[in-house]
Image: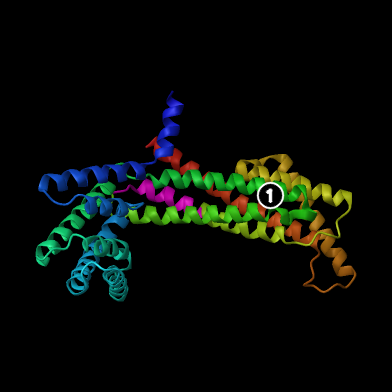
Amino acid sequence: MVELKQKVFKFVGGRILKTGLAAFLTAWICDALGLPVLFAVITAIVTVEPTASDSIKKGIVRFPAAAIGAGFALLFESFLHQSPFTYALAATFTLIACHKLGLDDGMLVATLTAVAMIPDASGDYMSSFVFRLSTTLIGIVVSTAVNYFVMPPKFHTMINQGVERLYHNAGDLLEQIIADLTHARKQTLVYQRLSRDLERTYKLIGYQREEWKYRRHSMHEVRTFSVVLKKLEYLQKILYHLGNMLYTDMRKGMDEEDHRIICEAGHSISKAFHKPSNQLTQKHIESIEKLEDLFHRLDNERTEVDEPRHHFTGKMIIIFELLSLNDVIDDLCTLEQKEDRYTKRERER
């Protein structure tokens, strides 16, 4: 039963619940004040943002933009009445004016205000103008207040979970690449999906920074946040090396022993993505030492046959990228050890 409730809550989502609450409160306030409800509710729905910061900043822009839309609606309605040209001109000039004045975040609300106001326009244009802006203001204020006070988003938790998932997926991708080096490009879609997930995580990072401008936060939160940022930097390096492995030409293949050494090290590194402390095991250390010896032997062989110093075979590139990935995971392991020591000291205080 508890699991079912969690699934339902996850499906509904905080933003959906806040949108419904904003619509209810807006309708209730407008009804109590005797103001038109419909457009105020529409405004409240379209102005609920992912963060309270966005709601506040965009709300400041949306109200003057809505005033511009209402003004153009009354202007063209007074000349052309309720004709198709009235709607088209009101929407077009509203968009142009908002763009020229740098009110791009208010374009949607302004255009909705303009086109929705035309059917209700009466001879008393000033009253229509005031009523329409009043309902718009109520919708904006209610959605902003709900977004700020009700169910504040926990981006930090989402970011931590996203980073952990990214490392697991990167380990899985490396495992798939190592399993079929000659056809590694088949994993391109997986690599692209991983890149998009990384971009989405950085977007959440931006949301968290914006939220902290309007909410109190502790030094501990700031420290853990900086650790997460460092982990994302390592992930970017990891994606770079995985991308190089995807597009390395391995059609020439390799002998069985070299292939075994590379696969053994690759599998061990992929496990370290899931659990960085795996690097500390003797088995992992031995597999990396064998990989390093293989790289130096191939490099010496290349020098003995007088090949150009800049020329690396596909086999050497794969080995180099694996060693580079191991270095990144080594840095990650060091970072986590420092963080564990810091957390332990904080608990002892």
Task: Pick the quarter of the image with the N terminus.
Answer: top left
The boundaries of the magenta stretch are 216-230
Q: Secondary structure at mark 1?
A: helix
Q: Position of residue 177 (x, y in %)?
A: 72, 51
Which residue sits at x=75%, y=61%? Answer: 248
Q: Residues within 10 Å of mark 1 (few under 14, many from 20)?
A: many
Q: In which quadrant will I find the C terminus?
A: top left
Against 277, is 174 above or below? below
Magenta stretch secondary structure, dominant: helix
Res 327 seen here: no
Identify whether 349 is placed above or below 56: above
- Image x and y of residue 42, in percent: 27, 52
- Would residue 15 appear left or right of 295 to someone viewing this image? left
258 lies left or right of 287: right
Q: Which residue is mark 1?
A: 174
Question: Does the stretch in magenta take in 228?
Answer: yes
